[in-house]
């Protein structure tokens, strides 16, 4: 074993890059002070995002996702599953350096020395560490793919609490992709386009962080122009998913041009000076018109951008192609989410005097969609969303504490109870908030207080989601006004949860 250790140390010293994911400078690889249940929640939610991404990947990028899925499985203490994932990659893509390195790490943790040695030897051979031309030809291409996969991983790191951390991880990911391109001169063009797409995505996320921080536009310009060039290349891809999203991202960038004092040069250089963002969004929809999964993805992006009507139209297109809830439940869930948002938007407009009473037909439409999904694909999110619909059907639109339909409120509580029986159901703060509101309206105030407390504990430190704290304070003040708690209890509860919201 000592001889093997020396070999590994020598291997690391001689490398210009280090294969594998377990050594990367990601929060994922470091211990956290957060409770195990919270840590597991973050890991599982990220894993769900990765599985969603995997649905769209058929090329080499799928191995970047699979490697990361293996890492998440390991940290979720599913070591055997992690091992199987890495083994599967080595069988599907025998020259995948990250898979061999990750597998060696797993065997080391399992104290399977012989298997670890075999993985290390295979890794050394693939990297050409015993040859003089270790950074030539195939060795260079393997290094490029290794680096690209590592760059991809940084987009899925966990516990990125502040903007600085987000900037750091996104920048590292982009640096690794740039290094991959420098190594991968012989990588097929179509494969490089998948890297360009990933890089453009990272750049767009980074630019949004810079915009939120009010960064100087000079800092943004170079990256903005580079993103335009990357997307221009992705538009030539044979991959429909990449092309559709590239048009969508291009529309997003063209909308952001107004955040600069002068039009970025890249817009003129790439030939987009006279292009309207809506034209780009239209082309994205046209490319994806017969592909419901991609239409659903576009709908999510438009929803994120606040383009609810456009998102709804795209969602309806996906349902026109595949109306079966069993085959296209995602579209029904997405449409329901937007109908709920439209209802809440109407409520806010009424509150400020810009509209009459909100249109309850949006809630009823969401109810119909979600009840179709519950029958064929019951899951945590569906129970939560349908419970939210019943909650709003049960309370007055303008005064949430006023009960109008007790049966609807009871139905909401039943759905929340079912959601809490599922994995992650007891660690979602939004579920606790909604349950607490229902209990408050039913005058079960002590139970409601506990729900709001738990929601605050479940929220990330520094979270911008303050509804749980607001609800707790309002309820405590109400109880104090009703003389059901005294000043000492009020001050104790208030100070305890103010402290809990402060960063460490």
Image (cartoon, helix red, strand yellow):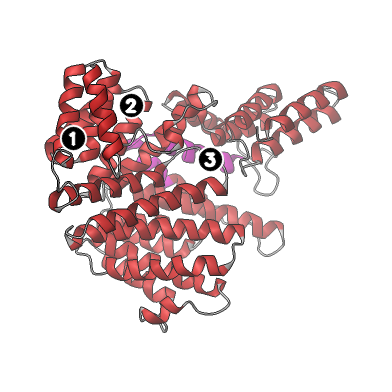
> Measuring 54% from the left and 29% from the top, which residue is drawn there?
413
**Number of the label disc, if any, that sits on residue 123:** 1
The magenta region covers: 368-394
Residue 243 lies, with reference to residue 274, above or below; the image says above
Q: Secondary structure at mark 1?
A: helix
What x and y, as percent, mark residue 336? 44, 49
Foreground: disc 3 or disc 2: 2
Q: Nearer the viewer, residue 383 or 207?
A: 207
> Measuring 62% from the left and 44% from the top, which residue is drawn there?
464
> Measuring 47% from the left and 40% from the top, which residue is drawn there?
386
371 to the left or right of 426: left
User: Label 1: few (<14), some or many (≥20) within 10 Å?
Assistant: many
In the image, is residue 200 part of the stretch drawn in magenta? no
Q: Earlier in the sequence, mark 3 or mark 1?
A: 1
94 to the left or right of 359: left
Q: Earlier in the sequence, mark 3 or mark 2?
A: 2
Which residue is label 3 attached to? 388
Q: Earlier in the sequence, mark 1 or mark 2?
A: 2
């Amino acid at each position: 074993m000592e001889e093997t250790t020396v070999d590994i140390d020598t291997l690391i010293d001689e490398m210009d890059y280090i294969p594998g994911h377990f050594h990367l400078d990601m929060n994922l690889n470091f211990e956290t002070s957060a409770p195990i249940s919270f840590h597991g929640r973050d890991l599982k939610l990220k894993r769900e995002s990765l599985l969603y991404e995997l649905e769209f990947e058929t090329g080499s990028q799928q191995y970047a996702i699979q490697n990361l899925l293996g890492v998440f499985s390991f940290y979720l203490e599913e070591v055997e599953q992690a091992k199987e994932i890495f083994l599967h990659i080595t069988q599907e893509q025998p020259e995948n350096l990250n898979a061999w390195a990750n597998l060696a790490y797993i065997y080391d943790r399992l104290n399977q020395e012989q298997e670890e040695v075999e993985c290390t030897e295979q890794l050394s051979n693939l990297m050409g560490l015993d040859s003089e031309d270790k950074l030539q030809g195939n060795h260079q291409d393997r290094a490029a793919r290794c680096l690209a996969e590592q760059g991809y991983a940084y987009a899925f790191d966990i516990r990125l609490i502040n903007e600085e951390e987000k900037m750091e991880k996104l920048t590292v990911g982009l640096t690794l992709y740039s290094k991959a391109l420098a190594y991968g001169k012989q990588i097929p063009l179509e494969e490089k386009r998948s890297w360009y797409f990933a890089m453009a995505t990272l750049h767009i996320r980074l630019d949004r962080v810079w915009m939120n921080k009010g960064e100087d536009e000079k800092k943004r310009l170079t990256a903005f122009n580079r993103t335009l060039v990357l997307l221009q290349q992705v538009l030539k891809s044979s991959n429909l998913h990449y092309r559709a999203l590239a048009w969508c991202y291009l529309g997003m960038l063209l909308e952001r041009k107004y955040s600069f004092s002068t039009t970025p040069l890249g817009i003129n250089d790439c030939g987009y000076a006279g292009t309207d963002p809506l034209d780009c969004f239209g082309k994205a929809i046209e490319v994806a018109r017969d592909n419901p999964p991609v239409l659903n993805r576009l709908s999510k992006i438009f929803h994120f951008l606040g383009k609810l009507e456009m998102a709804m139209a795209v969602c309806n297109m996906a349902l026109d192609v595949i109306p079966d809830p069993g085959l296209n439940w995602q579209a029904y869930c997405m449409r329901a989410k937007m109908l709920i948002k439209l209802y809440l938007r109407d409520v806010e407009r009424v509150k400020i005097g810009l509209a009459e009473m909100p249109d309850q037909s949006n809630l009823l439409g969401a109810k119909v969609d979600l009840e179709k999904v519950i029958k064929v694909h019951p899951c945590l999110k569906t129970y939560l969303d349908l419970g939210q619909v019943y909650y709003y059907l049960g309370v007055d639109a303008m005064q949430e504490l006023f009960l109008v339909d007790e049966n609807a409120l009871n139905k909401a509580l039943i759905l929340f109870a079912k959601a809490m029986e599922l994995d992650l159901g007891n660690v979602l703060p939004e579920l606790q908030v909604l349950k607490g509101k229902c209990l408050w309206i039913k005058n079960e105030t002590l139970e409601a207080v506990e729900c709001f407390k738990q929601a605050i504990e479940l929220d990330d430190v520094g979270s911008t989601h303050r509804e749980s704290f607001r609800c707790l304070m309002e309820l405590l003040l109400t109880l104090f006004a009703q003389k059901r708690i005294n000043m000492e209890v009020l001050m104790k509860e208030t100070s305890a949860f103010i402290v809990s919201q402060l960063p460490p």
